Amino acid sequence: MAYGSGAGAYAAIAQATKASGVIVRLEPQEFLALLNRIKDPLIVTAKSGWPVSGHQYLTSFKGLAFYTKSSSPLVLPGMADIITAQSIWIP
């Protein structure tokens, strides 16, 4: 079965979502509040550059992945393990 470009893009996004699981997008303040509930959080950070430059953050909690982006750097908890990635791609 042939897909049009729109259907093909949708299928690729659906497949990426299946591979990555559930990703919950939060506002930066909600993300920081969540981090304060996690003992020794692991946070992946990356700078984004297109279409708008900023900062991206990703962590997990109780089997879900939580993501936020901010135009300015967030002040992360001191007990966090931080991994700086080249990029974070969210479908």
Image: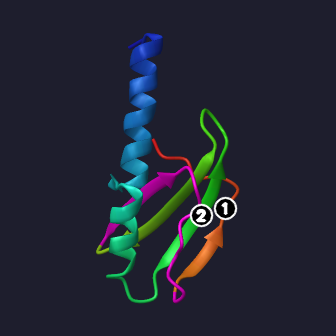
Residue 59, x across and y down, in percent: 45, 68
Is 65 left, or right, of 57 in this rendering? left
Quarter of the image with the C terminus in it: top left
Q: Using the rendered view, name the quadrant where residue 16 is placed.
A: top left
Residue 55, x across and y down, in percent: 59, 54
Quarter of the image with the N terminus in it: top left
Q: Using the rendered view, name the quadrant where residue 35 is placed.
A: bottom left
Q: Is residue 50 magenta?
A: no
Residue 42, x across and y down, in percent: 50, 78
Give the magenta range. 63-79
In the displayed structure, 25 sits above or below 60; it is above
Q: Using the rendered view, name the quadrant where residue 21 is placed.
A: bottom left
Q: Amino acid at mark 1?
A: Ala
Residue with the mark numbered 2: 45
Residue with the mark numbered 1: 85
In the structure shown, which secondary structural element does the residue marked by tag 2 occupy? strand
Q: Residue at x 31, y 70 (%)?
A: 63
Is 49 left, or right, of 4 in this rendering? right
Q: Tags 1 and 2 in contact by the CB under 8 Å rule? A: yes
Q: Amino acid at mark 2?
A: Thr
Q: Nearer the viewer, residue 64 or 50?
A: 50
Is 15 left, or right, of 76 in this rendering? left
Count every numbered label the image shows and give the total: 2
Question: Could you tell me how far apart the alpha carbons at marks 1 and 2 are, in whole angstroms?
Answer: 6 Å
What colouring style does the render use?
rainbow
Q: Residues within 10 Å of mark 2 (few under 14, many from 20)?
A: many
Residue 33, x across and y down, in percent: 34, 73
Query: Mark 1 or mark 2, which is nearer to you?
Result: 2
Q: Residue at x 52, y 75 (%)?
A: 76
